[in-house]
Amino acid sequence: GQPRGQVRPGSSGAAVQRAPQAAGPEEAGEDAEVSTRKKTFAEVQTERLEQAERTVLIKCPPKLNEKKLLQYLSSHGNIKSHFFFENRGIHALIEFSEKNSIASLQDAIGLPSAAEYHVVPFKSRLFTFMLKNPVSQAAEETPLHLSPQSHIPVKELIEKLCHADSISSQMYILLNEYQLTDENIKLRYLVCSLVRDFARAYFPDSTVKPFGSSVNTFGKLGCDVDMFLDFHDTQKHAAKTKKGPFDMEYQMKRLPSERLATQKILSVVGDCLDNFGPGCVSVQKILNARCPLVKFSHQPTGFQCDLSVSNSIAIKSSELLYIYGCLDSRVRALVFSVRCWARVHGLTNSIPGTWITNFSLTMMVMFFLQRRSPPIIPTLDQLKELADQKDKLVIGGYDCSFVSDLSKIKCTSNTETLDVLLGDFFEYYGNFDFRRNSINLRKGKEVNKPESSPLYIWNPFEQDLNISKNVNQPQLEKFVAMARESAWILRKEQKAQQMTNKEPWGLAALLIPFGKSNSNKMKNRMKGIGSETIRNLLDSLKLNNPTNLQKAVGK
Ligand code: GTP
Ligand code: MG
């Protein structure tokens, strides 16, 4: 297979990659011998959703005796896993082995006293654990182990990176610090499962599934939870309609458009979360957007959530990225580094605008990896060739079929190091002819731009759409400038010298805003090089004046 050993960091113990993480991490040991085969996207989702249904979340008092809590809960059933985390107080996530343990627990739990407030009698799987006698029930000496739910600040990360022995190791350290943990993934699926409980009040067959970076292997700690309501119980209905000489169908309310139905459904589910959802705050219905959604903040888990209604194309995009992320360990390492780099330099932003989105940026990394020689990941057309009957899928007239079984995809023979790939990524996009060419992951080729958007990335499934239509010329120019500067820093770098001077080097040097602490160094480098182009480039960065780059990016 792909020579994972070669791309792993060498001596740096901290950077050992949790390779199976993306494919659904297992509790240590338990499933280890079952199979090393990577699970399909659908398998991971089914497994995780089922696990979430056996899970409860308990707010705990500050001084807690872990053993006693577990003992108390065990009287309702076997506890399969648990962990604690801090989020406006201590919380415990408890996964039971059996779903019916939760019903047993719920039967034994009391309602909050309604002295001050009137409580809405909706019983969820969020509980508060209290000590009747805090003094005698106080905790033992051993403090609780709290599982972190956010990543370290960039400043701390940079310090860690300086101790690594290669850029490749630095990239794996970043990946390990930022990627979602098994615990965090459990919390994400739990939120979906809790929202599903509300949706089922109206639609008993519905499910709520996560998509986007929570599931596509590129999520970092702290990213939002994108989830959608799914009503497609297709298998069940297909089986029923075939039997017998008669046909029966449900009488259902008919609406003039799917969009209107989506808006009505989201409106009531949004109201329900707003009025009755424990811990659901800042509920915002954004029903007139291109893709209508309900935004809310889930306080017990601390997640910002975006709820929409089943969007098959977005799910296929998540699955495609999942496959790419699982194929080779370098893929996720490169994406995490590039995303972090882009965030530091203000190329991406959490608020929507004219900047590049993380989604577009990830697609740009995928395209770059398709363009390597030999390619590190296959094109979408190649994945389509490998699809079998059950993978066939047409959505809205677009063929969205591609292989779901990862073991059918041949591993790459490319053995380039991440040191090379990171530098070449910046060089590739620093010199890309954005004026003429577009990025097409289906073909894995640069093709002529079909229209004049500054940045054109083909939607892999809806072939006439540009996923980066929002990006304007100044933002693209800034991206190119930053890419060039970064390529230059990596090329010129004298690692040994910088390491002895304890200066940030390699990836660390790229994660410091260029305008600030680097400006003196940049001037020094300019003296040495004396290149007119670089001088212009630096001036343009300093003055925030993109004219010098306009030629390159085509204005
Ligand atoms: P984060 O920044 O980590 O949240 O990445 P993300 O991939 O989750 O992005 P985001 O939350 O903005 O969007 C969620 C999902 O919606 C993405 O993964 C895509 O599947 C889809 N999506 C987002 N933006 C676009 C777009 O412009 N076009 C299309 N076709 N899909 C998009
Ligand atoms: Mg997201």
Image (spheres, helix red, strand yellow):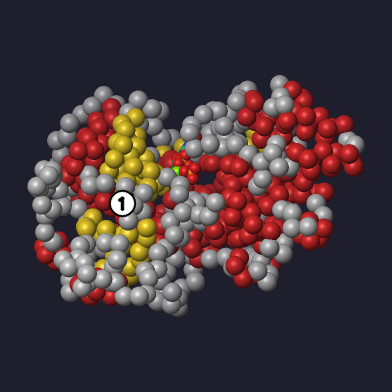
Q: Which residue is mark 1?
A: 300
Residue 459: image location, x then y, percent: 53, 36
Crowdedness of circle 1 by 10 Å Cα count: few (<14), some, many (20+)? many
Q: Is residue 537 left or right of residue 226?
A: right
Q: Residue at x 15, y 48 (%)?
A: 122
**Of 194 and 212, which appears nearest the observer?**
194
Q: Is mark 1 within 8 Å of ligand 2?
A: no
Q: Is residue 529 above or below residue 62?
A: above
Image coordinates of residue 362 in percent, x first then y, are 57, 45
Q: Is residue 246 left or right of residue 20?
A: left
* Quadrant occupied by the N terminus: bottom right
Q: What count of labels does the image hold?
A: 1
Give residue 209's position: percent from left, percent from top.
Answer: 34, 49
- Relative to residue 129, is residue 243 depicted above or below? above
Q: Is residue 510 above or below residue 36?
A: above
Please say whether residue 274 is visible from this viewpoint: yes
Q: Is residue 486 above or below residue 450?
A: below
Q: At 26% from the left edge and 51% from the top edge, which residue is drawn?
A: 194
Q: Quadrant of residue 412?
A: bottom right
Q: Position of residue 381 (x, y in %)?
A: 57, 46
Q: Left or right: 281 with respect to 531?
A: left
Q: Amino acid at mark 1?
A: Pro
Q: Quadrant of residue 261?
A: top left
Location of the C terminus by quadrant is top right
Residue 429 visible to the viewer = no
Between 26 and 370, the residue placed more toward the observer is: 26
- What is the residue that sits farthest to the front in this orientation? 135
The residue shown at (88%, 35%) is: 531
Who's the residue at 37% across and 58% down the image? 86
Q: Secondary structure at mark 1?
A: loop
